[in-house]
Amino acid sequence: MNVCCSRSYQTILQEDQPMNVSFQVAKRFIIISFILLLTVTLMMSLFAGCGVEKKECTAPDQSTITITPSFQQVKTSSGLSTDMPFDWTVIVKYQDGTPMPQACITVSGSQAVPNAGGAYQFQYYPSWTSPNLAVDSGFSAQTDDYGQYTFSTVASAGSSTWSDTIYVRSGAIVSTAFLAVNDTSY
């Protein structure tokens, strides 16, 4: 009789039992590790961003907004014969004088399109940018990493005499600039 085949089924099970126990332990370890990893991942995703202060983009109190130039004017003897662009640079600074990057601003004027009279049109970019984007009074923009934003206004051809105040706001902070077309033929 073959020795290998003469062993009883009971003997074979007893000899394999240590291997079954090791397999069971490894299986439990893998399952528990997976559950722990899943729990930690869920906790991290639920609390991601907690304790990180979200930065507001509006200028805080005591900040400053400067518009350069503060006054632009064109004199004409018979009204504007062509559209006339004007460039403006806005600088937003914190109270300590450092530039405020990515500051949210709103730009408006009472005689700008779409307001009654529509003497001029705001352009989202400076006049040298092509193509430019015409935007309505009250448009929103954001300063660059150096706290600056440059836009333009285009006075409409045929305009004679008018003036307007341009307002730039960020939060409670407001600054103004003045734009005028003066017909000297009167």
Image (cartoon, grey):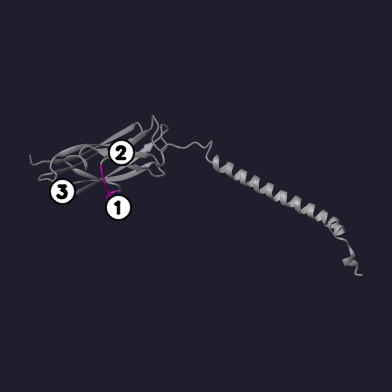
Q: What is the quadrant of residue 184 in the picture? A: top left
Number of marks in picture: 3
Query: Amino acid type of disc 1?
Result: Thr
What residue span does the magenta drawing correspond to? 126-136
Residue at disc 2, secondary structure = strand
Q: Report if residue 181 lies within the magenta region.
A: no
* Of callouts 1 and 2, the N-terminal one: 2
* In the foreground, 12 or 24: 12
Residue 32: which disc?
none
Whole-percent x, y for residue 140 in the image: 32, 41
Q: Residues within 10 Å of mark 3 (few under 14, many from 20)?
A: some
Query: Amino acid type of disc 3?
Result: Ala
* In the foreground, 17 or 137: 17
Residue 67: which disc?
2
CA gap, disc 1 to disc 2? Answer: 19 Å
Task: Check disc 3 and report the residue beneath it.
Answer: 157
Whole-percent x, y for residue 146 in the image: 40, 43
CA gap, disc 3 to disc 2? Answer: 25 Å
CA gap, disc 1 to disc 3? Answer: 20 Å
Up-down: is 175 above or below 19? above
| Residue at figure coordinates x 30%, y 52% from the top left | 129
Residue at disc 3, secondary structure = loop
Residue 129: which disc?
1
